[in-house]
Image (cartoon, rainbow, N blue to C red):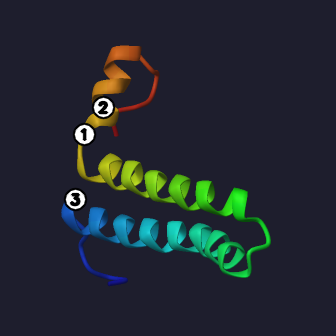
Amino acid sequence: MLFGKFGDVETRILMTTLGISAFSMTSLGCAIAEEKQTARYLSIPGLVASGIGLVFFVLGIWTDWFEAVRRQLALPFSDN
């Protein structure tokens, strides 16, 4: 993994794995608050926001929707 050649698919798989890990950590705090009944009104929206964020993150990795948005808005990011 450290010395191999990474193509587009391998990079996307690693980024998806990192995204699932990160969004699992963000939802963990909300799940603990829900279980302890301490911040119930904030825990459920936090879980929903984490789930929606994960969906958009994975879609952003596996689809080329950012390129379409960038072209529509003419954002000055490089095409590297």
Q: Give coordinates of residue 18: x percent, y percent.
A: 44, 70
- Residue positioned 60% across, 54% down in the render: 45
- For the residue pair 70 and 4, the one nearer the viewer reads as 70
The quadrant holding residue 70 is top left
**Residue 10 image offset from top left, x and y in percent:** 24, 69
Graded by Cα atoms within 10 Å as few (under 14), some (14 to 19) or many (20 or more), the crowding at tag 1 reads: few
Q: Nearer the viewer, residue 71 or 16?
A: 16
Q: Nearer the viewer, residue 57 or 9?
A: 57
Asked if 42 appears above or below 39 in the picture, the reply is: above
Q: State the image quarter where residue 4 is shown.
A: bottom left
- Where does label 1 land, which residue? 64
Callout 2 touching callout 1 (CB < 8 Å)? yes
Q: What kind of residue is marked 2?
A: Glu
Apparent side of residue 41 relative to residue 2 in the rendered image (left or right): right
Quickly name the residue at label 3. Answer: 8
> Spatial distance from mark 3 to mark 1, Cα to Cα?
12 Å
**Helix, strand or loop under label 1:** loop
Secondary structure under badge 3?
A: helix
Q: Which residue is mark 2?
A: 67
Query: Which amino acid, mark 3?
Result: Asp
**Circles 2, 3 touching at the beta carbon (< 8 Å):** no
Amino acid under label 1?
Answer: Asp
Disc 2 vs disc 3: which is toward the camera? 2
Which residue is found at the position 51% from the left and 56% from the top?
48
Quadrant into which the N terminus falls: bottom left
- Whichever of callouts 3 and 1 sits on the residue coming sooner in the sequence is 3
